Image (tube, grey):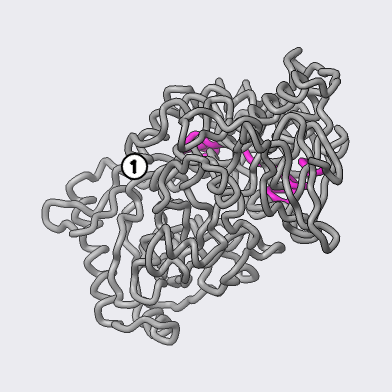
Amino acid sequence: MAFDSTYDVVVVGGGNAGFSAATTAAQAGARVCLVEKAPRHDAGGNTFYTAAAFRCCFDGLADLLPHLYRADGAKGLPGELVESIEMAAYTKEDFHADLNRVTKGRADPVLADILVDNSREAVQWLMDNGARFVLSFNRQAFLVDGKYKFWGGMVMNMAGQGKELFEFHLNTGEKHGVTVHFSCPAVDLVTDSTTNEVIGVKVFRDGKLQSIGAKGGVILASGGFQASPALRAQYLGPGWDLAHVRGSKYNTGDGHAMAEKLGAKLEGNYSGCHSVAWDANSPRASGNRSLTNQYTKSGYPLGIMVNVNGKRFVDEGFDLRNFTYAVFGKEILKQPQGIAFQIWDAEGSKLLRKEEYADDVTTNLRADTLDELADVLVTKGLKDKKRFLETVSEFNNACKSYSRDHPERKFDPAVKDGVSTQGTEKALEIPKSNWAVPLERGPFQAVEVTCGITFTFGGLAVTPNAEVVSEATLGEIGGLWCAGELLGGLFWDNYPGGSGLTMGTVMGRIAGREAAKRAKSRGAGMSVSAGPRGLPV
C-alpha cells in the first residue's frame, strides 16, 4: 500500500501515555509521528486537566529530595522545611496492598506487578527529562503540631499540575524529533492483508483522508470513552449520560472501536469508571481549561454529604481521601437529581483546600446557624429541611456518643484516626468510620456537587509488552500496542489516587520501546541512544 507519509512508529493520542510512548521510541532512535484528535489550543487529553500527581514506590523523603522543586520554581527544599516533614517510605508491598484493597482483588496481577515494579523508574525518567516535581503539601499533607504529616503514599505532583505536564511532554517530544499533528483524528488502522499485522493508520487531516505508514507499528493511547454519553449509558448504565465530563471532550472511544474492528480482545471493568464529587456548576460536556482540576470537591472527609432529601448516603470516612474520591462520584449520581451537598462547620472549613473551595472557584453557601443554612439549601434544591436538620443532629449525637466511649482518641486528618459515629449509646446506620466530629460551630458552609467522570476502566487486553491481544488467537496483534486509559484489566470499581498517570507512563514507555525495537528489526536503520542510567530510554 502507498502511504502519504511513513514513520517508524505512529502514536495515536497526545496525553501523558501517548507522549511517554512517543518520546521513549524517539530516544531509542525511531522516527515517530504522534497524531492528536484535538486542535493545539484544546489538546493534552485528560492529562491537561489533572493535578499531575504520580504514585510511585520510594525509600522515604531522602530518596526524593535531590529531585524536588519548591513552589517558586527553585530546585531543592530548605533545611528547615525538610525538618518539618513526616513522610514514610512507600514500598512495593504498600502499593500492592493499596491496589488490591481498592480493586477488591480484581486487578490483573501481571499488570499490577508491571505498575508497581516500574513506578519509581517511570517517575525518575520524567525527572531526568526535566519534569519539575513538588511535594503535594496542599493535597497530601496536613499541618499537625508543627509537622507536615504526609498520608496515603502519594506525595508528589508536577509543579504546574496537568497544564505543565502536557507542555513538558510536548516540548520533550519535539526536542527528540517527534512529529506532532494536531486536529488529526485517527479513523482506522491499516493492516497487512495477509498477516493482519498493523502497518499504519488512516487519519483525517487538512480536510481529507490520509494514510501514515508505521514500520514498527502503531501505539494506541487515545483514552477511554468517558466523553461519549451514548457509550457511557451503554456500558456504565442508565443515568450515566447525565454525568459531567471532568476532562477532554475528545475521549469518545475511538481506540476501542478501531482495535475492536481488528478483532482485539476487550478486557476489564466496562461497567466501571473513575468518577468524583464534582462542582455542580461546572460545564457538562468537558472540563474547564482554566480551572481544570479545581472543580474537584474532595473535602467530604472533613464533614458530611447529604442528598436533596436531607439524608447521608455514604461513609465519608471509610478510607483516606485518595482511596475514596474516585468512587464517590457514582454514589452521588445514584441520588435523586444526581446531586448532593457537602456540609462543614467552622472547624472543618478551616481545613478545606483553597484551590477547590475558594469563593472564586465555587459557589459557597454559608450561614451562621444550621437552620439558616437549611433555608439556603432549600433554594438550591433541598426538599426536606426537617430531615436535613435531623440528619445533622443524629450525626452530632453519634459523634459525641463515640467520644464518651473513647476519650483517648483524637481527630487527626492525616491518618485513619478511628474517630467514628459508632458509639454504644448512639450509632448510625451509615457510619462515618474516621474523622467524625460534631458539626456545631458556625458559620456553616455547604457546596453543591454532582458526578464528574474522569475515565473509564474497560479497555483492551494487552501482553506484558503492551501488545494488544487478539480475541480469536489470544496472541498479540502484530504491530499494535496500547497504553493509558485505553488499557483494560488493571482498575476495577476504584483505583489508588495517582496510579493512572503512573501506569500511563509505565506502559507508554514499554510500548514505545517495543515498537522502536520492532521497527529496527525491520530495517528502519535507527541508532539507539542511552538514557541517564545507561539504559535504553
Is residue 148 rendered magenta in the image?
Answer: yes
**Do we see residue 477 in this rendering?**
yes
Three-letter code, disc 1: Asp
Q: Going 42% across and 23% down the picture, which residue do you hit?
A: 93
Q: Nearer the viewer, residue 441 or 329?
A: 329
Q: Which span is picked out in magenta?
A: 144-170
Q: Going 60% across and 38% down the picture, which residue do you hit?
A: 483
Q: Going 60% across and 71% down the picture, which residue do you hit?
A: 283
Q: Secondary structure at mark 1?
A: loop
Residue 388 placement (x, y as % from top left): 29, 76
- Judge left or right: residue 438 versus residue 394: right
Q: Going 77% across and 31% down the picture, which residue do you hit?
A: 215
**Do we see residue 412 in this rendering?**
no
Q: Quadrant of the C terminus?
A: top right
Q: Nearer the viewer, residue 373 or 195?
A: 195
Q: Say how many tags the image has.
A: 1
Q: Is residue 271 above or below residue 526?
A: below
Residue 267 placement (x, y as % from top left): 44, 41
Residue 248 placement (x, y as % from top left): 64, 59
Q: Which residue is mark 1?
A: 417
Q: Nearer the viewer, residue 36 or 165?
A: 36
